[in-house]
Image (cartoon, rainbow, N blue to C red):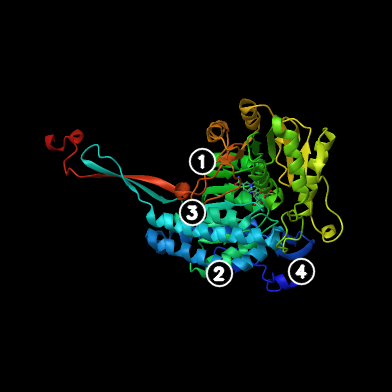
Amino acid sequence: MNISDKISDISFSDTRLFIGGEWEEGTGADITSIFPADGSINCVLKGASVADGERAIKRAKAAQSDPAWRNLLPHQRARYLYAIADGIEKNADRISKIQTLDTGKTLTETRALALSAAATFRYFGAVLETSDDELTAQRGEYLTYSLHEPLGLVAAITPWNSPIASDAQKVAPALAAGNAVLLKPASWTPLVSLELARIIEASGLPKGLFSVLPGAGREIGNLLVEHPDIAKVSFTGGTSTGRALAVKAAQKLMPVSLELGGKSPTIVFEDADIDLSIAGLLFGIFSSTGQSCIAGSRLFVQKSIYKEFVEKLVTATNKLVVGHPFDPATQVSTLVHPDHRQSVADYVEMARADGGLILCGGEAPTGDIYDKGAFYLPTIIAGVTNDARICREEVFGPVLVVMPFEDEADVIAMGNDNEYGLACGLWSPDFAKCWRVARAINSGTVWINTYKQFSISTPFGGEKDSGMGREKGRNGIKAYMAQKSIYQDISGKLHPWAKVHNS
Ligand code: NAD
């Protein structure tokens, strides 16, 4: 495979940021984007400083309150979302390469993410056009309307693991709702969000309504959270960052949506189809190299089939192709950054020190293409209990812990015994049993005989330390709107309390 051929059409010579509709060099600290498969530098750009952020906010405020935007009817606003969707689709190949270079994800995956981002813009355009406001039940000689209006300025703060998809999940509904959006991508992966800015600019969206401000969380992220003109922050990222941000938001009484971490249980019952469940759970934990908030990272297997199942699982895991992200045969690619690989490796060493048995993986592969990249082998750990740190904390890498369970009650208790509550996978042909367990598990999403299946029309979010609020679905757009009630008299009568005719 000639890799340089595959990327010869991509250059990162333009290092400007998109600040309130203008392409300008940032004045913040340097951001270095690397291709983690070989450590080469994609580009170095200057991130957004507080001054850049303030300029973007000022321009966003002017653009959002301009009647040219504010008075657009829903079907007129929807046209921008359709144009953005078309632009993403048209540039899917380019977006996919940029995102692979920035994150190390396989081209197969980044292409799917680009197409899902296009679908997200199209979906929210359609939701916008087909959402009705309400005339509420009449209770007197007046009419009451319940309307939804834009909040104003929305900050979208996103992580590095699936930038184009998590950007779209916030930017599409927030723009559809009539807001201006200031997007702050993670410092490790600024490039695809800047590409999204080019597509949004080409859609003709009025200048100022959209900004991309890569930069340090503590600086530009903090500005967006604390600034009085920002009406909402929609955040996806780690739980500790989300918690700190929510405290600041509370001081401003500002609404926040938080999509946070996970340590999701996957449960294989003794009556499960073994091949079906192994295929599904391998995808659930090892695709995206485990860098997925919904990764099924805690596996519970019923005792009666535990030994046979785990043997087959380890054999199948050892056959996964760990390789270069541009190679279509690759199933497990590099991690996003060498520092992140170190953090994954540290977790595995900690589990080993705690008595964990490494059934496969447990180290970085060596030789060939591996030495320069941030690769780590798919790893399965047994011999630990549900209270071990490796079972409680999010590793965010290709690391699965496996534990046996006795029965339904036992596994519900263990599944729920964790700070997180993002997702859960159940494997059994017994519908009634799956239904009972699905209802008993505290998580925002449950997959039955499938995993990591996603639909933009289905709400997504977490319970407990996995966050609050829901994205996607028809109501996803309402999360970026303020509700207003209007009362209108239809009697034409004087109010009796005022006694106007007696005076
Ligand atoms: P992170 O919390 O370190 O960073 C997320 C974003 O917040 C980045 O843009 C970062 O720059 C910014 N940030 C950091 N400090 C900030 C501050 N003080 N104020 C404002 N913004 C700040 O997370 P990460 O390492 O980029 O991403 C991995 C995490 O994201 C994992 O925990 C993963 O589970 C979570 N995640 C959750 C979902 C979900 O939908 N629930 C999806 C993807 C990723």
The residue carrying mark 2 is 90
Judged from the image, the secondary structure of the residue bearing numbered disc 2 is helix
Q: Which residue position is annotated with label 3?
A: 173
- Eye-nearest disc, 2 or 4: 4
Tell me which amino acid carries mark 2: Lys
Q: Position of residue 281 (x, y in %)?
A: 67, 44
State the CA–CA distance, disc 3 to disc 2: 21 Å
Quadrant location of the C terminus in the rendered image: top left
Instruction: Tell me the crowding category of disc 4: few under 14, some 14 to 19, or many 20 or more residues within 10 angstroms, Cα based.
Output: few
Whether tag 2 and tag 4 are in contact, CB under 8 A, the answer is: no
Callout 3 touching callout 2 (CB < 8 Å): no
Residue found 62% across the figure and 65% down from its top? 95
Q: Earlier in the sequence, mark 2 or mark 1?
A: 2
Mark with earlier residue (3, 2)? 2
Q: Quadrant of residue 2?
A: bottom right
Please state which of the two labelled residues, at mark 1 or mark 3, is closer to the viewer: 3
Disc 1 marks a residue whose amino acid type is Leu
Q: Quadrant of residue 260?
A: top right
305 to 328, vertically: above or below: above
Q: In the rendering, at what x and y percent does residue 146 appear? A: 34, 45
- Mark 4 or mark 3: which comes first in sequence? 4
What residue is shown with label 1? 253
Ligand 1 contact, mark 4 (Cβ < 8 Å): no
